[in-house]
Amino acid sequence: MPQWELKIEGRVQGVGFRYLAKELAYRLGIRGYVQNLPDGCVRIIADADENTISNYCKLLRLGNGFSRVDKIMTEPIDHPREYYDFEIR
């Protein structure tokens, strides 16, 4: 299955965004992880097909009422690792 790296910019740290990302990933059957980055962004590694990633990004853009997503950058990963669940790091 393809794997993707997503970098989300906006107000996404300190507002429960990683928990939202995990809940949405669980609902969509996405494996991988989410983590805060030092620059204030959030990074997601997601193991899913292109259609599922597209839906995931649409849901992430809606946020949780406290977050604000300004930009989502999505790139395929050339050498994917295997993940068995979705975790918050």
Image (cartoon, rainbow, N blue to C red):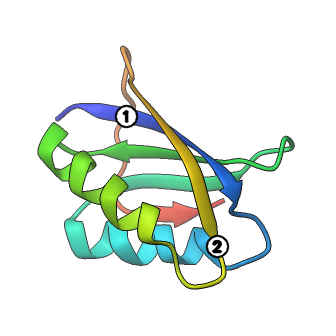
* Front-most of residues 69 and 75: 69
Residue 29, position as x, y percentages in the image = 21, 64
- Is 26 situated above or below 37? below
Q: Which residue is mark 1?
A: 4
Going from N to C along the chain, the mark reached first, 2 or 1, is 1
Query: Which residue, as the protein is rendered here, is positioned at the far bottom?
Result: 65
Within the image, what quadrant is residue 1 found in? top left
Q: Is residue 1 above or below residue 20?
A: above
The image quarter in which residue 15 lies: bottom right
Q: Position of residue 41 (x, y in %)?
A: 72, 47
Indicate the position of residue 87 as horizontal and vertical percent values: 51, 64
In 3D space, how far apart are the residues under numbered discs 2 and 1 (Cα atoms)?
22 Å
In the displayed structure image, the side of residue 48 where residue 5 appears, left or right: right
- What's the residue type where badge 1 is placed? Trp
Query: Which numbered dot is residue 67?
Result: 2
89 sits to left or right of 32 = right
Element at label 2: loop
For the residue pair 3 and 55, the one nearer the viewer reads as: 55
Residue drawn where x is 53% and y is 81% of the image: 64
